[in-house]
Image (cartoon, rainbow, N blue to C red):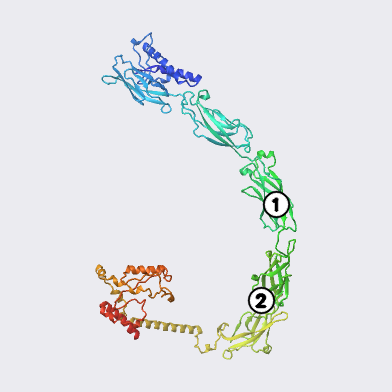
Amino acid sequence: MTGKLNGSCFYNLSYFYVDCAVNTWRSSCGTMPERLTEMLMDTWTPLIILWITVLPSIYMAPMNQSQVLPSGSSTGLKRLTEEQRILNRSKRGWVWNQMFVLEEFSGPEPILVGRLHTDLDPGSSKIKYILSGDGAGTIFVINDKTGDIHAMKRLDREEKAEYTLTAQAVDRDTNKPLEPPSEFIIKVQDINDNAPEFVDGPYHATVPEMSVVGTFVTKVTATDADDPVYGNSAKLVYSILEGQPYFSIEPHTAIIKTALPNMDREAKEEYFVVIQAKDMGGHMGGLSGTTTVTITLTDVNDNPPKFAQSLYHFSVMEDVALGEPIGRVKANDLDIGENAKSSYDIIEGDGMDIFEITTDAQTQDGVIRVRKPLDFETKKSYTLKVEAANIHIDPRFISGGPFKDTATVKIVVEDADEPPVFSSPTYLLEVHENAAINSVIGQVTAHDPDVSSSPIRFSIDRHTDLERQFNINAEDGKITLATPLDRETNMWHNITIVATETRNHSQVSRVPVTIKVLDVNDNAPEFASEHEAFLCENGKPGQVIQIVSAVDKDDPKNGHYFLYSLLPEMINNPNFTIKKNEDNTLSILAKHNGFSRQKQEVYLLPIIISDSGNPPMSSTSTLTIRVCGCSSDGIVQSCNVEAYVLPIGLSMGALIAILACIILLLVIVVLFVTLRRHKNEPLIIKDDEDVRENIIRYDDEGGGEEDTEAFDIATLQNPDGINGFLPRKDIKPDLQFMPRQGLAPVPNGVDVDEFINVRLHEADNDPTAPPYDSIQIYGYEGRGSAAGSLSSLESSASDSDQNFDYLSEWGPRFKRLGELYSVGESDKET
C-alpha cells in the first residue's frame, strides 16, 4: 500500500495484508496466536515490497478509502505527465495519512511500520528523511536513507492509541527541505490483551423470599480495557458459574433474576453466586473475569406464631400485688423483625376479669399479670385460654391459614398468711360532746381471712391521737372516751385503728376512723363584739341609738334564736328601751331628748341574751352609751367633756397639730446648738494627743550593709532557753513545766540557727507542743539590755508600774516616745 504525498510515498502494504489476514482469522477462529501473526508478517512483507519495487509505474488501488485525504488539499493528488503514462493509464498519486501497527507485537528486531519515499529521490542517496512528533526518535525511528519507519518498543493501545508524526525530505548536504513537511498518524491496532474486570465487585443484593421466577435481584457491570469499536475484544457475555438453579443472569445486560419459585428464607437465607464476564462475544479464546454476588433473602410474613406448648401451669400467692407478673408464655414465629411481632389476648376462661396479658416488646413474650386481688379462700385456681396473633399480616399468604395460635393456661392460687381484714374500709362514729368518760362511742371489727383464723388484737395509733382522748378494747375493738370533748374546740377527730394477729405480729392492718363530735347546748349567747353606742345631745325620742347582734358557739339543728331583755330592776329605765328585730338583732332606742354631757357623759345598759336550747342558756352583756356633741345633721363631732374648755372652732385635731409643730421646733433648736458647739472646738490636736506623729516621723531608712555589719547577731542568743522551762502560752498551764526528754543541753554560744533547730526538735517530739499550724514566737532580744524587753507579750507588770524616763537617754526619737507614754500616764492619773 503506497501513498504519494507531495512526491513522497508511504509504503504500508505488508501491514495491510497482514491486518486483513489477522482480522479474517479473528472473525472466524478467535484470537490469532502471536507466532502465526509473526509468520504472516515475515511472509508478506518481502513479497509486497518486491512487487512495489518491480512495478513502480503501476499504482495500486486503495485498500481503505477512509485513509485517503481530499484531493483538493495541499497534499492532494498530482497528475502524472504524459511521459509517465503506461498502457494508456494515468498514474494516480494516493495520499496516505495513516499507518497501523499491532499492539503488544514484539520480535527479535524492530517492527517495520512503513516506508517514506519521494519522487525526487533519484537513488543517489542525496535525500535525507526526517521524522518528528510523538515518540519520534524513541518509539519510532526512521532510516534517513531508505525512509523505513520502525517501532522500537512494544506498544500498548490502552496506554496510547495513536501517535501523530511529521515526515519531511531534505537535502542531505544542505539540509534544505525538498518538500513541505507532511503529517501522518500511526494508530496502534488493538488485540485482545485485557480481561474483563468487575470494578464494583464483590456485590451484595437482597430479594424477598417466596418471590416468583424472574424477580429482579440486581445488576452487575464489567469493563474491558480493549477497543470496543475494533473487533470483539471488548464484547462481553455474562454467565453464572455458581448459584444455579436458584438464579439466572441475562448474557448481555448482566441482570440477575430469580430462577426458582418460593425460595424460603427459613430454609436457606443466603446464597453465594459467582458471575463470569467473557470477551470475544463469549467465544473460545476470549478472556474472562469473575465476581461474587452474595444474595440474601429478606423476610416476609409467611409463618404463623406457634406456642411451644399447648398447656402452661403457673402458681401465684394470693397476696401478690396488683399488676405483678405471675408468668410468661411464648409463641414462636419463624419470621423475623416486624413479621415476628405478635399480640396476646385472653379469649376464654373463668379469670378474664382477674388476669390480663400484655406483650413484652423486647422478647415478644406474653406476660400474665394480676388485675384484681386474689383470695385463696374464695377461689383456688383459674383456667385461661390465651391467643397469639401476628400484628402484620401479608395478604399474599393469608390463604395459607390463620396467622394465630392458642394455648391453655392454668393458674393455681396458693394460700398466704394475710393480714387482718376490717369489716369496713373506713369508719364514721358520732358522739355528743357531753358524753361521759369511758363511755363507748363505737366499735370496729376485723377477722383473719386465713384458714387458721388467728385471734385479733386492736390498738390505736397514738401518732393520730396525741392527746389520748380515746381508748380501745384490745379484744372486741370497742372505742371509749378517755377525756372530755368540746365540739366548739374540735369538731372532728381522725384516728387510726391497728389490727394485729396474735400468732404473727408482722401481719398488721390499719383502718381510719373518723369521729364527729355532736353539739349540745352548753354555751350562752353573747354580743358579737364589744359595742359602744353614741347618743347625740340633740337626739330625738324614739331614735335608734345602736343595733347589736349576738353569737352562740353552739350549733343547734334549727339555727339560732335569741331573746333579749333588760334586767328586772331596769325594765322601767327612763332613758332607754330595746326592740327585737326580725333578723335576730336588737335595736337600742332613746326614750327622750335633752341628754347633756355635762350632766352625764356615759350610760351603762345591761342586756340579758338567751338562746332557745334545752335547757336554755343566757348571759348578760353591758352596752356602753356615750353622749356626744353632734352637728345639725346628726354627725358626731366630740364626745369628751373637755371639749367645752377649748376655744370655739379649735378641735382636738388642731390641738394635736399645734403640739407637733412645737416639738419639731424644739428638736431643730437642739440640733443647731449642738452643731455650733462642735464648730467652736479647736481643730488642732494637742501634741500629747497627736498619735499620728508616730507614723509621720518614722520615715528614715536603715544604714544597709553598715547596720548589718555593725549588728552583732550573738545578741539573739537566748541562754535562758537552754533549760527548756520557759513559760508556754500555747498549752495548758498544768503541762507547761513537764520535763522534756531527749533534748541535749545547748551551750551558751549557740547561734540563731541552732536555736531554731532546737525549737523545731521540741515541736516534733514534745506531745505538749502546739500543732504545725501554730505560730512559734522568738522574741528574745539578748542579754545585757538596759531597757529589757520591749514586748508586752511576756510583761507581767501593768503599764502603770513602768517608768519611761530612761528612754530620753536613747536619743531624740526615743525621748519623744517616752514623753508620749509619760503623758498618757499623767492623763490617767488626772
Residue at the image point whose x is 34% and y is 86% from the top: 829
Extreme residue toward the bottom, this view? 599
Image x and y of residue 38, in percent: 43, 18
User: Nearest the camera: 603 or 716?
Assistant: 716
Q: Which residue is mark 1?
A: 314
Q: Nearer the viewer, residue 761 or 321?
A: 761
In this picture, residue 809 sits left or right of residue 631: left
Q: Nearer the viewer, residue 3 or 24?
A: 24
* Quarter of the rendering containing residue 91: top left
Q: Earlier in the sequence, mark 1 or mark 2?
A: 1
Instruction: Rate crowding at label 1 as few (under 14), some (14 to 19) or many (20 or more) other CA atoms within 10 Å.
Output: some
**Residue 202, relative to residue 428: is it above or below?**
above
- Regarding mark 1 in the picture, which secondary structure is present there? strand
Q: Is residue 106 above or below residue 739?
A: above
Reading the image, the residue beneath label 2 is 488
Badge 2 crowding class, 10 Å Cα cut-off, few under 14, some 14 to 19, many 20 or more, is some
From the viewer's perspective, is the residue at label 1 or at label 2 nearer? Answer: 1
Residue 687 is tagged as none
Q: Is residue 182 visible?
A: no
Please provide percent x and percent y for residue 630: 56, 84
789 above or below 186? below
User: From the viewer's perspective, is residue 274 above or below residue 47?
Assistant: below
Q: CA distance from mark 1 to mark 2?
A: 59 Å
Quarter of the C terminus within the rendering: bottom left
Please name the residue shown 72% across and 68% down the image: 444
Q: Quadrant of residue 723?
A: bottom left
The quadrant the N terminus occupies is top left
Which residue is most to the left? 706
Residue 198 seen in the figure: yes
Query: SS at mark 2?
Result: loop
Under mark 1, the amino acid is Phe
